[in-house]
Amino acid sequence: MTNPIAKWRQRHRNPISFWLHVIGIPACFVAAPVLLILRHGWLALATFAGGYALQFIGHFVEGNRSGEEILVRRILGKKKLEDTMQRADIIAAARKLVKSFKGALAMGTVTPDGKPHLFWMGACVFQEPFTLYLVTSRESRKVSHIRSNRNVELLISKPDFSLSLTLSGVAEIEQTPARKKRVWEGVAASSRYFSGPDDPSFTVLKVQATQLRLWVDRTQHEPFVADL
């Protein structure tokens, strides 16, 4: 059985949220009842409301729902998002994120001795159906990893983590000159590191995704999973 204190602490990791609850909970359930017993009704009501306000502010800062809101949603019959999102919706949301993504992403590879390794990558070029092209150097470790083990993982997320996606797939070195030229044109930062698409060090990694895992809410514990 999960320790209720540990579970509560997990949902209140942000220091601001934690201390607002440390003040708000006693205000609601200690100070307010005492004031009510002492017949300070309006002061008790104000203390109770203020205590709850502090807690709701804490959850706003934390970026998750309060226990009371979760309970009310259950009573009103609000289904979990996991129960309402269909496979087509999951894939559409993932596709939209990848197409609009402009920042850095994380790429996981497998070393020759079987250990995981993580790299930061720049922008990618997306092609249907879930094929991504990324730029790197021929001398990079990720290239040597992919030559020995083609399995990779990509992590893409919005800056506020309100939408996050991991893609599992296989990678290969793209050799087609026309494709390399299109990727060069699609990834503007390439010119900072290479002289052009014909630069011997300019290497394009082609990643064909086979499965995606999507988080559409910062409070979502388990991802939506779709095979591609």
Image: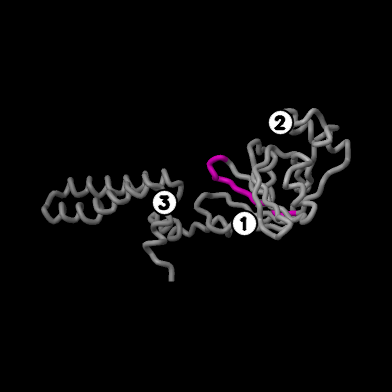
Disc number placed over residue 13 in the picture, else none = 3
Mark 2: few/some/many CA within 10 Å (<14, 14-19, 20+):
few
Name the residue nearer the viewer: 77 or 93: 93
Q: Which stretch did the figure color magenta?
A: 159-169
Q: Where is residue 6 drawn, in percent x and y? A: 40, 61
Nearer to us: label 1 or label 3: 3
| Secondary structure type for disc 1 | strand
Q: Which numbered disc flags the more N-terminal residue, 3 or 2?
A: 3
Q: Which residue is mark 2?
A: 189
Q: Which residue is mark 1?
A: 224
Give the amino acid type for the residue marked by disc 2 in the picture: Ala
Q: Which numbered disc flags the more N-terminal residue, 1 or 3?
A: 3
Q: Would you say residue 25 sits in the magenta stretch?
A: no
Q: Residue, x 83% and y 37% (percent of image)? A: 180
Residue 223 visible (yes or no):
yes
Give the amino acid type for the residue marked by disc 1 in the picture: Phe
Q: Where is residue 105 drawn, in percent x and y? A: 64, 43
Label 3 and label 2: CA atoms lie apart by 37 Å
Name the residue nearer the viewer: 26 or 37: 26
| Secondary structure type for disc 2 | helix
- Say left or right for 28 vs 203: left
- Say left or right for 161 vs 150: left
Give the amino acid type for the residue marked by disc 3 in the picture: Arg
Of the 4 image quadrants, the one containing the N terminus is bottom left
| Secondary structure type for disc 3 | loop
